[in-house]
Every structure is written in structure tokens, then in C-alpha cells.
Image: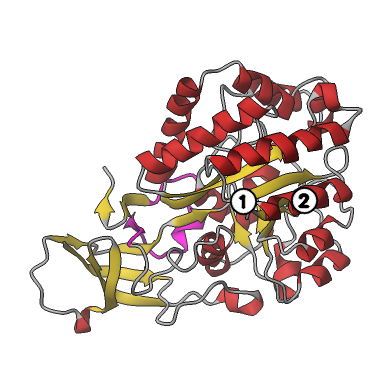
Amino acid sequence: MQTLIINIKELLQVRETPIDKVSGSDMAVLPSIKNAFLLIEDDTIAAFGSMETCPKLNPEITIDASGKIVLPSWCDSHTHLVYAGNREQEFVDRINGLSYEEIANRGGGILNSAKRLNDTSEAEIYQQSKKRLEEVIQLGTGAIEIKSGYGLTVEGELKMLRVIKRLAQDYPIAIKSTFLGAHAFPTEYKENHSAYIDIIINEMLPKIAEESLADYIDAFLETGYFSVAETERIMEAGKQYGLRAKIHVNQFTAINGIAACVKHKALSVDHLEIVTKEDIEALKTTETMPVALPSCSFFISIPYTPARQMLNEGLPLALATDFNPGTTPSGNMNFVVATACIKMKMTPEEAINAATINGAYAMGLSATHGSITVGKKANVIITKPLNSYYEIPYAFGSNPVEQVMLNGKLIS
């Protein structure tokens, strides 16, 4: 089946030659075509160009995008979308002056979510999670990574990962699954870290591999959570099962975790609210993608990833939501792009590159997603009529998305 989108005011992120990612000063360049067409055959981008070169066809579907921007769907490479209940009380606690660490020490935070998840059936978790997934699809997300990490028991982690697998089977969005058993230490293992890591390695990982439940492995590498040495042990174990690392690191402190992640060829290092010169040097000319989560900084009032410093040093950067019940209860990538521009001083071009092609890279999907390239999946956003694509981050409280297409089909 052919779908032809015509009279596009501006078609963004057009790449004649496929690329994996963009870095440094190249992130300021967002290739586009004004007054453009986009031809889709079945689920694939077949051709694009200016309207002057639009082929004369009789497609099954023609969409007139006059006044509208068309761009590849957002690629959200870091979420915790599968969870039970919420943590709205902790939101009020923070307003009343408690810090993230203080809330965690009172049994809140990740351990709160773990208790709720283990008390909730797999069927109910699926029902809650599918609503969140449907919402982010309507907001323009066309590829997403979802982590476990709120089980912290063998059955709890497997339950989460089975829900993620079912979502991937039931919805047309590309979903990558990440095993995050090393999210926090359960209360009974607070003084015996090694014993819990043994459970992750010897009990969780073999069962996850048996059911093919994960694509990546993660750990919360942070003071008070998993040390560098503990995280390295987990990354090594993941390799034995073909699970490449995507690691939470430098959210609150810098403890040389980034260098350890690079040594183990982690696909991404995520959060990076605190970044040292040594961290930047460790990331240069590597395969590891730094990922910023600005809506987390917004929600819990912590520093923002120093994007300008990192880009000026030639690094790439991806943007993601960190959608989770405690520190970022939103999967809105439009707001992430806006916040990166407003608070991190990224240009709209840099932010869109970070939220599309670089986000795809951070999930291992840049061969199929993240740009308008012939042969890639036809996952696109058609905006409402806009003055320019600058309006996407400028009008940060408005939803710019009018239509969403996944695998060549409009999502109703």
C-alpha cells in the first residue's frame, strides 16, 4: 500500500545517506526540505523530496500536510513505563522539603514502587502500562525503551519483563526491554550487597535469558546504590547473556562510573546531571551515547545535564523522558525537547537531533528509526499547522502533534 504526504511545509531530519548518530557541532545541523513530499510503501519510507519532484502516482492514501511540519517520531531511549500505582504522596513530601534521599531512607522511592508492584497482578500491571504506552504514542513517540527494576525479586522482575514483552507484541511501536534488577537493594540485603547481586546473576539472568525477556542490562550506579565495582560485576554478567549495558550514572554524584561504563562498552550512560572534565574525556571518541533526562531535573529540582559543555567538547547527546512514578511521571517527549532548549540551552536543531537519531542510537535502532531515510520504518509525526518547527519547543505547554504514523499506518 502507498501513502503519499504532500505539501509538507517542512520535512525535518532528512538523511540521504544513513548515519548512526550526530555529535558536537554537527548536532546544530538539522537537514530539511521545505514544500516537500514523503512517499511511504507499506511500512517503509520509499522516497522524499521537494514538491517540484513529486512523482505522479495514484496512492491508496494521500495526506495534505499544508502548513504542517513532518518529522520522524520521537525515540525515547530511557523509561520505566511499566509500574504499579503512583507516588503522588512523595511529590507532596518534596514540596514540603524532603529530598530524594530522605524519601528513600523512609522507605519511599524505588522500594515503595517495588512493594506496590509485587502486590499487583501481572494482568493489572499490563492494563495500567498499556494506557501509558498509548498516551506516549499519541504524543509522537515511535520507539521506546522500557526498564524493569521495580520488582527487586526474581518473580517481580520477571513479571515486569513479561509485561514489556507483551506490550511489544500488542503494539506497533518499537520497544526495547532493559533488565534493571540492580535498581536498588531490597531492605533485607541492605547490609549484604553481594548476596543480592548473586541473585541477579545466578537466578534472575538465567530465567530472563530462557524466556528472551531483555535486550539490555542496567544498574543504578550511584552513591548509596550500586558502586562502580558492583556495577562492573553486573555488566560482566550481562555480557554472558548477550545483554549490552545501558547504565544510570552521575545523577547525584560523580564517582568515576562513566569511565567504567565506557570500559565495558556500554551503549549509553544516562542521567549525567553531574559531569566532570574526566567524564567528558572518558566519553570522547567512544561508542557510548550520553543521555540527558531534563524532565527529571525539572520535576525533582536537581541540576540539568551540562549539554552546552558536552557538545562544545564534541560529544553526542540523546534526550529521553525517564518516565517513572517517582521522579518523572511524564512520557511527553515534546516537553523534553522544550525543556532541553529552555533549561539546557540546546538549540531546537540540537534537541530534535538528540530526540530522534541519537535516541534511536541509544536503543540500537538507528538503522531503522530516527530519521527520514529511504528504507527506514515509516514512523512519523505530522504536526498541527505551525509557524516553524521552533514552535515545538517554544509553545512548551501545547501539544504540537496532530497525527502519528507507525509502520506506515495512521494511529487513531
Looking at the rendered image, the quarter that the C terminus falls into is top left
Element at badge 2?
A: strand
The secondary element bearing badge 1 is classed as strand
Q: Is 70 drawn above or below residue 50 in the view shown? A: above
Report the residue marked by disc 1: 216
Q: CA distance from mark 2 to mark 1?
A: 16 Å
User: Between tags 2 and 1, which lies in front?
Assistant: 1
Residue 331, relative to residue 72: is it above or below? above
Label 2, on which residue? 249
Based on the picture, tell me whether residue 371 belongs to the magenta stretch: no
Q: Is residue 26 left or right of residue 174?
A: right
| Residue 301 visible in image | yes
Colour approach in the figure: secondary structure
- What amino acid is found at the position of numbered circle 1 in the picture? Tyr
In percent of the image, x 73 and y 38: which residue is there? 202
- Residue 229, how many percent across, how many down? 88, 50
Residue 246 shows in this picture: no
Looking at this view, is 327 or 171 the one in front?
A: 171
Residue interval drawn in magenta: 378-400
Closest to the observer, 195 or 18: 195
Q: Mark 2 belongs to which amino acid? A: Val
Residue 380 in percent (x, y) is at 35, 59
153 horizontally vs 31: left or right: right
